[in-house]
Amino acid sequence: MIIETSQKVTASQLQRSAFLYIRQSTARQVLEHTESTARQYALRKRAVALGWKDDQVMVIDSDLGQSGASAADREGFQKLVMEVSMGRAGIVLGLEVSRLARNSTDWHRLLEICAITNTLILDEDGIYHPAEFNDRLLLGLKGTMSEAELHLIRARMRGGLLNKAKRGELATPLPFGFAYDDEGRVVLDPDLQIQQAIRSVFDVFRQAGSAFGVAKEFRKQGWQFPRLIRAPGGPAEVGWGDLEHNRVTRILRNPRYAGAFFYGRTRFQKKVEGGGRTRDLPRQEWHTLILDAHPAYITWQDYEENLRRLQENAQTCGLVKRSAVREGPSLLQGLAVCGVCGSRMTVGYRQRKAGPYPFYICQGPREVDRIEKGYCQRVSGYSLDKAIGSLLVETVTPLALEVALNVQKELQSRWDEADRLRRLQVDRARYESELARRRFLRVDPDNRLVAASLEAEWNSKLHALSEAEQNYERQCQADQLKISSVQREQVLALATNFPQLWNDPCTANRERKRMVRLLIEDVTIRKGEQVQLDVRFRGGISKTFILPRPLSFCESHKQNPAMVAEMDRLLDDYNYADVARILNENGFKTGDGLPLTSTAVGYIRTAYRLKSRFDRLRERGMLTMSEIAKTCGVSTNTISDWRRKGRVRALAINDRNQFLFEDPGPSRPKKGARKPALGNFAIQRCEPGLGPLSGRLTGHQVP
């Protein structure tokens, strides 16, 4: 029998409230271990026996079903600590230390606050005062034992779990496409439509080369993908919808689809501020990886190849990434390497009369300040791509027949796959309509409310079936026509002529890039007096050749010398927009026969090293806005206001509303001075016939 040490209870503590803290670790314990919960509620009588009134006993039971490993998610424990710290608690009651906390940090924090506020602690063994050494020592030992007990429980449970995982017998949630049979073995999902949808993801990725390409192809073809639909308060059901990019990447990265059992691929790390995050581990740190553990959709080699392609596509993960092929015409996109710094070169395009004109540019390593460095080198891509195309034609010609036959086989398999998917969608729609029909026929005809609802559902399923059948027929006719009359003839006609296939305008740029990547690993570019290309093939063989340095735009499109001379003369008095307008009015054109624009004037001026409009005006003694503001002793805003009102003479230097100002001399205007009715002063005026952006501003004397 336990002897109550009621001598520790004082009158000041009885004037405060008694807080009874109740907790169970899991929701299952709350439902099944009811005796423990009842014992905790019974501690209320202990508080009353010690002298507290019944209405003074506050019960905190909001943490039922919460683990005591941390106080972060326990609102009830946080409320208890707050009440104790504010001096409202005379005693804290708990069945045992483990109910209050299983973490030494939380437990000792509570003891420290109780000692400061003169609050007692009661458990099933007795009453303790944390301010007394012996009681504090005993409570500290109990807290340590409670934490050690939690560790032992977890160690026993995790040991059994890891042993099952090591044998590959641990039942873990399965991704779409798999299910457990009656004996607990992993098998392919019995739903054939789900199986075909999973296989289509891998097949399309093999063709498209990117996760975005898979999602785009599914939307383009109207294919649907399974997903879980969780109705509020109901079980999860399988539904069908669009395939998103993030789901594609999860499928491609999941080893289950390669028939492998794995465990311990991630690790949870706690944060200082509370909570935590899940971190992916490298494969060598996984706890268990068992290959060929169950049926698969792809081989392990295909799985590793998919991971490699995803890694190449992830440009943000590192410096040397190839990225997925795009629609642009540049053949070396993702393959060009700078011969100066070793970084991957990016691709840009300029719009020309014949279409987009590619160029390759290296912006230097990422750790270098690009604002100061600029870029390593910039090379026109037209001649480089042409040389690479000629190299491929010379290299691949003996294999042209095999390539053409593989293309034909790929086209046929793609059509067969699409046909199977559409047929399965029709079968599912037919099954759902038949199921709705049977439900309607089984209902009592007199129950009109239920019968009307089931009849409406049957009609909607019939409508969906009709749409699925019509879409299937329409797509089949289109695909059959495309395969039989166009693609098949082209493949057979070009089977022995790979150069014609390569140079055919109908061949998409994306397909040409894929052909390049099948043979070439990367191309290192060094630009000097000539351009050196070091081509490294997939097999390890390399080849180096030299190309003439590509001409600049003005070098390849010589400008009319008379136009350049007239432009040089006009820049003394006009800005770029007015120069372009006047030259167009006089019948001048650019080197490739296009009308002149403000941008073209600036580019030609730079290429022919003509003096800029700014330098010309500065040589004439014009001042910048800050200089004239300092001269007049006013702010730049005042100068802008004076320019708009014509009190200072300004000339535009470009089309972006930037001006240079004439030095007003001794007769400069004063801030706040009123504009005189008579007298000589300069005002801003546009000459007749010039637009508002011309900037041809002259002085005019008012009589």
Image (cartoon, grey):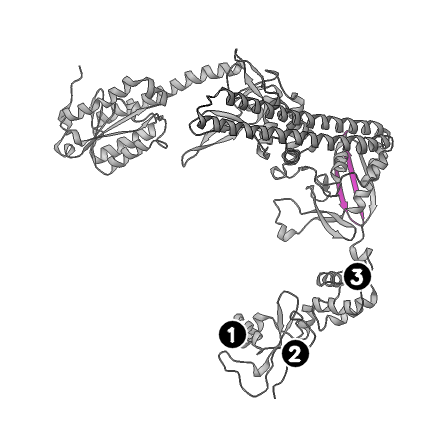
Magenta span includes 418? no
Tags 3 and 2 touching, CB below 8 Å? no
Q: Amino acid at mark 1?
A: Val
Q: As rendered, which of 65 and 455 lies closer to the eye?
A: 455
Point out residue 108 in the picture as x, y percentages from the top left corner: 30, 30
- Dot 1, crowdedness within 10 Å: few (<14), some or many (≥20)? some
Q: Amino acid at mark 3?
A: Thr
**Is residue 438 visible to us here?**
yes
Task: Find disc 3 in the rendering and name its residue.
Answer: 590
Is tag 1's residue or tag 2's residue first in the polypeptide sequence? 1
User: Disc 3 to disc 2, how far (Cα)?
Assistant: 31 Å
Residue 245 marker? none
Q: Are marks 1 and 3 in contact (CB under 8 Å)?
A: no
The first of marks 1 and 3 along the sequence is: 3
> Would residue 115 be found to the left or right of residue 545 on screen?
left
Q: Amino acid at mark 2?
A: Thr
Residue 532, given in percent of the width and then of the height, sits at: 80, 43
Q: Secondary structure at mark 3?
A: loop
Closer to the observer: label 1 or label 3?
Answer: 3
Mark 2 or mark 3, which is nearer the start of the sequence? 3
Q: What residue sits 51% from the left and 21% below the top?
A: 441
Image position of 570 with respect to 439: above or below: below
Task: Count every numbered label the image shows and give the total.
Answer: 3
Write down the residue under mark 1. 634
Classify mark 1: helix, strand or loop: loop
Give x and y (percent) for residue 295: 61, 16
Assign a secondary structure to mark 2. Answer: loop
Q: CA distance from mark 1 to mark 2?
A: 23 Å
Q: Which residue is mark 2?
A: 698
Tell me: 683 left or right of 172.
right
Residue 292's quadrant in the figure? top right
Write down the region rendered in magenta: 522-539
